[in-house]
Every structure is written in structure tokens, then in C-alpha cells.
Image (cartoon, coloured by chain):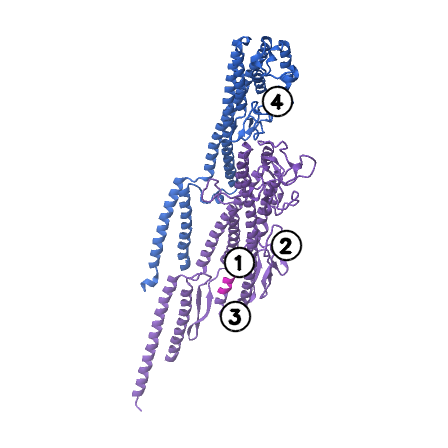
Chain colours: A purple, B blue
Amino acid sequence: MSLSSAAVTAQTGLSTITAEAAVLSQNIAGANDTGIYSRKTANIVSAPDGSQAASVTRASNQAVFDNLLNATSANAMHQALSSGLDQLNQTIGSLASDSANSPATSPEALLSRFTNALYTYEASPSDATLAAAAVNAAATLAQGLNSAAATVNKLRAQADAAMAASVQSINALLAQIQAVNGQIVTGTATKAGVADAQDSRDNLLTQLAQQIGITTVAGANGSISIYSDGGVTLFQGGAARTVTFSPTAVYIPMTAGNAVFVDGVPITGGSSPMPTSSGNLAGLAVLRDDTSVKYQAQLDNIANGLITSFAESDQAGSGPNLPGLFTVPGATALPASITGLAGQIAINPGADPNQAGNPLLLRDGGISGNPSYVYNTAASASYQSRLSQLLANLSSPTAFSAAGGIAVNATLDGYATASAAWLEAQRSNAASQSSYQSALLNTATTALSNATGVNLDTEMSKMLDLENSYSATARLLSTINAMFGTLLADLGNLPA
Amino acid sequence: MTSFISTQSIASALRQAVLQMQSNLSTGEAELSTGKYADPGIVLGVKTGESISLQSETSLLQTITSTNETAATRLNVTQGILASLQDSAQSLLDSLLQGNGSNTNAASIQALGSSNLQNLISSLNTSLNGDYIFSGTNTSIQPIADYYAPAAPNKAAADAAFLAAFGMPQTSSSVSTITGPGMQTFLTNQFASLFQGASWSSSWSSASSNTLTSQISESQSVNSSISANNPAFQELAQAYTMIADLGTQNLGAAAYQAVNGTAQNLLSSAIGNLVNLQANAGLTQSTISAATSQMSAEMNILSEQIGHLDNVDPYEVATRVSNLQTQIQTAYSLTAQLQHLSLANYL
């Protein structure tokens, strides 16, 4: 051993300490990173000339990270569903019928108000004011159904646009993952540092999990493969697959939205062999293709129930029933198809005082303008039979199409109530799922942060250690320097 | 083994907790101020349907209760009119009985008959809120033609029948020559038929025999009006017209006797019918008030049930809100203290 080899060891020590300090300051900088920052540790190995920083290890925990991905997807799905249902809830308004500042606007509440107006009118059939009040209540009900149907269409169009945005961001994320994954594979092969690239890949994976549920499988050389939760390959062998979707801009009740495809395989919709079941995309697809379609069908059923309950029959001959108070603009017969009625239903201009119609026709019949359909042939001012018949129609059970997913045989009022209850049940369920999943996500985030995150105090105390080592090594160097000085001075004093 | 905790999770635990508690606090405040759930749909879920149907049931009962007022008012007015008609019929009958068939008071009896007839017509033509209450369902049309109006169809029919039977008008002084049996035959046949069936409908009444029905509860409906075509009114009209407009003051004793006797029979039968009508109307009135009080009891129960579903327990919410306040304050002071808990401060 020589004095110069001691100096070399001290030098190596200094560079090891600075390498460790570099990792440490990286950790301190990343301590409050809201994305994924994994704690880095410098690996020190013994070498002939003292210890050296050989590589940087990244703290990781695959199981906890997988949990985080699952929780992220599930949470995103329920968030999407829950916010969509909140939007549908606008059609209900306040639930309390006596609430003054936000009146109940649900089809059920409007129907109940109209029924009450009709009852009041039935008690005094000669009163034109009460007739006009009943017709106005009917107009409000029809408008309520129209705007509820418009809300549903708007929601479906929004969900469709959000799906397009989601697909776009999935493709962008996959492209980024492809680039980062390439760096990792190359880095792993050449033994270069890949810790930061791995962090950024994990970050991208969490963002991807927001949009679509994924599972990841680690491959050789640090590469990964990504599959959707339905089992469709999204990323494999270093190549991202293309996710395609053609958006539909305008939604009417008959519109069926397009499915999202990966490599030609649909991953949303009923025909999908491998449907995706979590993530923002899945939530939006359920909202667009299931929830809002059912609600639309319920509204259409209510509209159809109104039109048929108020249809007029031929009093003179045996002609077909004609639309009465409730109709579809321009209709000359009862509607053949139920689909879309909620968006079109209106009151017959013949009975609408705002369109120069006669509200008393509600009592007399013949709203369609055909004299054979007049019930009150004697023109009695207090003719009640027709009104009683209408009220009986409203309170007797009728059959509804099963497309609404709720009771098929109920009174109109019962059906409207069941529809509101259905919506609130969906909402309540989505909200509780959403808060459950978000709690789960919090737990998973905390667990991952604890498993792989940075504790500032630990880093600080490490810093103290490094500081001490550094000053000791520096001290050593200066001592060696002094020793060299002494040696050189002594050399000068040697006799020639 | 020491457990590891990251700085990030120490800080975010508090942040998340404060967020959660603040949103709970705002819900609690809303519930405390209204006494109802902040978002009943979320809390009730599928039971929302129950709350909605209870509410619409309540509003339906309220509507029926208020429309019952309409029927009750109509029946009250009807009762008053029936009572006054019965009174005036009774007093005419009394006068006829007192006269005991003699035609000495014929002129005053005739005047009494005439005023009763006018009273009957105006009573039956009573209208309430623009509806003629004795018109059956035909409420826009005055039910009884005014006998004393110019060209009145009922007066014309009576005049024509009299002329056809006796060859002279009622105003002729020769009515004193009409015999008792002659008058009796006229009264029982031609004259009586004027007040029945098609002749009644064509010359006297425009009313519909269909009476108004009222839905007085969800399941009950009752007849809530009386038509002017009721036999009681036909009999009254017949008796009053007989006395007022068959030349009563000039009739011979035998013919007067016939008029007097027939009128007495008709009046007593009419009074009996009027009493029946009043009894029936009274029964309907009590049915309506029973239905109304039944519905008001039902509404109390319903609103209690709605309260069970929608209302929050104010004590529970108040406790929750004050606990949350304490918790949030604790979280704030913890945040401030954690700020100092860093090794960096001691280096």
C-alpha cells in the first residue's frame, strides 16, 4: 500500500458520496411528486480502490401497483356513470313537491299536477277557466317530457364525444408508452439507468388505467405487455395497437352509437366478445348504450301512455281511434311506433287556447276536429262522462313495453313513479359505488406511496451521514496532502 | 420491523380527510336548515318511488277535498231552495184546505197560486257560479221557461189545451159555465199530460234528466244535483198553474171544487216528494263531509309517512355537524403542527 493509493481511495470515496448525494437530492425533489415517484437507492459496491456507486435501484412493488391500476379504473368508471346520472337527475328536479325554490319537474310530478287539474275540472265541467288550466297543465307535462327527452339525447351525445376524447387519449398514451418502453428495453440491455423511464412508464400506465381497465405483464428486458380488462391486447412486443372509434355527433332516440374497436374487435357494446368493464370508457359506454337508452324508453312509454289514454274513439261509426288531447304534431292517426314519442309529444292545437283552440273540447271530445268523435252530442255544459272516462283511463293499469327495464303493467302514474325511482336507485347505487371506489383508490395510492415513496426525514438523516462521510474523506485528503508535503520537504533536506 | 411512511402520504392523508369532512359539513348544514335530506334521491334510492307516490297521493286528496267544496256548496243551495219550495207549497195547501172547497176566496187563492208559480220558476232557475243548478248536466241553459214571459211556450201550451177542451180562453167570463165533471176530465187528461214526458220537455223544461256526479273520494262518487225534471217539481208546476191560470177566480163552484181538490192531491204528493229529495240531498251532504274528514285523516297519515322517509333527525344532524367542526379544527391544527415536524428545521 502506498500513500498515493490511499489518495485514490479517498478520491473514489468522494465521487461515491457525490453520486449518493445526487440520488438523494433527486429523492428530495420527488418527495412531493403527485404522480408516481419511486424512491431511488444508490447501490454501493466494494472495488479495489474503495467503494463505488455501481447502479441505482428503484423501489417498486408490483402487487400494490396493480391494485392502484384496478382501483383507478373502477373509480373512473363509477365517476363517469355517477356524473352522467346526476345530469339525468335534472329531469327529476326536486323530489319534494312542496319545495318552493326548486319545483319538482319530474314527469311524475307534472303528471300528478295535470291529473289534479283534470279532477278539478271534472268537478265543474262548465268552467272554461278550469278547462284552460287543465289544458295548460297538460302542455306543461308535454313540454316536461320533451325537455327530458332532449336532456337524454344531449347526454348521449356528450358521452359519445367523451368516448371519442377518451379513445384519442388512449392512443396518445399508448404511443408514449411505446417510446418509453423502447428506452427501457434499450437501457436494460446496455445496463444504462432506466429508473426514471420506469417511473414515467408507470405514470403513463396510471393515466391509461383512468381511461380503460388494464392488466400488465412484465416481459424480457424490462418490456411490458398491456391487455384490456376484457382480454384484448393493447400493447405487445413493443408495439401499440390502434384503438378506433367513429363518433356520432347528433343523437336522436333511434340512434345507436358506434362501438370502440381495438384491432377490429369491439370492446364496448352488447356485441362485444371481450367487453371492457372498467375505466372511463366503459362508464361512458354504459351511460350511452344502456342507462340513457332505458330512461329514454321509459319516457317514451309515458308519452305513449298519455296519447293512448286520451285517444278518442269514433262515436258515430267504427273508425279508428284518433289522438285526443295529447298528440304528435301533424299526426292524423295514433302513432305506430313508441320510439321517440317523448321528444315529440305535444297537446293538440284544437284544444290549446294559446293556439286558438277550445279547451272545452276536453269535455266534449272531437279535439281532432272530426264531428264523429264528439262525445257530448247534446252539448251539455256540465257533461262529465268523457272527463270521468279520461280519469278512469289514467288510473287503470296499462301494458308498457319492456324496453324501459321496469314494470310492464302499471297505471301511468305508477309507471312514472317507478321510472323516477329507477333513476334514483341507479344514482344512489352509482354514488355509493363511486365513493367506495374512491376510498379504495385513496388506500391504494397511500399504500403505493408508502411502499415506494420518499420520506424526507430519512433522506435528511442520510444527508447528514453523507455530509459526515464527505468531511471525513476531505479531511483524509488534506491529511494525505500534508503527509506528501512533509515527505517532499524531508526529501529536500536530504544530503546531496 | 419499522414501517415506512412517505412524506407524501402523511400530507395527503390530512388533505383528503379535510376535503371529505368539509363536503360532509356542507351536506349537514343543508340538512339542518331544511330538516330534510340534502339529496333524498341518493339516500332513498329505490324507495324514492314510495316518497313520490305518497306525495302525489296527498296532492290528489287535497284536490278532491277542494272540489268537494263545489259539490257541498251546490247541495247547500239546493237544500235551501227545496225547503223554501216546501214551505210555500205547504202554505198554499193550508189555504186550500181552509177554504174548504168554497170559491169565496178564489181571487186571493188565484193570486197566491200565481206568486207561487213565479217563485217556483225563479227558484228552479237559480244559478251558482254561472251554472244553473237544476239543469242536470245542461247547466248552461236556464231549465224552466218563464210562464209569464211574452210568448212563453208553457203558457201557450196551457192556453191551447184549454181552448181545445172548452172552446174559450181562460180569461173569458163564460168559464163559469164549465161543469165540475168537465173540468175534472180536463184536469186529469189533457192538462196533466202537459206536465209529463215529451210535452214537459218541449214546453216547460230545457233541463237534462242526467244529474251531476261528483267524485268525492278516490273510490266514491255521488249524485250531487237534482234535475228540474224531477216529479216533485212537475207536480208543483201543475198544481200552481192550475190555480193561477185556469180562470180560477171566475169558475163555478163545481169546477172550482174540482180544481181545488186536484191541486190539494198534487200538492200533498209534491210535498212528500220534496221531503224525500231533501232527505237524499242531506244524505249526500253527510257522505261528502264524511269523505272529506276521512281524506283529511288520510292526508295526516300520508304526510307522517313522507316525513319518515324524507326527514332527517335534527338532533343527529346537529351532533354530526358539531363533531365535524371539531374534527376539522383538529385537522387544521395538526396541519400547522406537522409543518414544524421536519428534520430540516433542526439542521
Q: Position of residue B6 (x, y in %)?
A: 41, 59
Q: What is the chain letter for disc 4?
A: B
Residue at the far front in the pictured view: B173
Q: Nearer the viewer, mark 3 or mark 4?
A: 4
Element under label 4?
helix
Residue A445 is covered by the magenta coloring: no
Residue A242, label in figure: none
Q: Nearer the viewer, mark 4 or mark 1?
A: 4
Residue A273, label in figure: 2
Q: Alpha carbon of mark 3 to alpha carbon of mark 4: how far? A: 121 Å
User: Within 10 angstroms of label 2, few (less than 14), some, or many (20 or more) residues?
Assistant: some
Name the residue tied to disc 1.
A209
Q: Alpha carbon of mark 3 to alpha carbon of mark 1: how far? A: 25 Å
Residue A187, label in figure: 3
Q: Position of residue A337 (x, y in %)?
A: 65, 45
Frontmost residue, A346 versus A402: A346
Task: Work out whether disc 2 and disc 4 sit on a shared chain.
Answer: no
Q: Which range is magenta?
A: A199-205
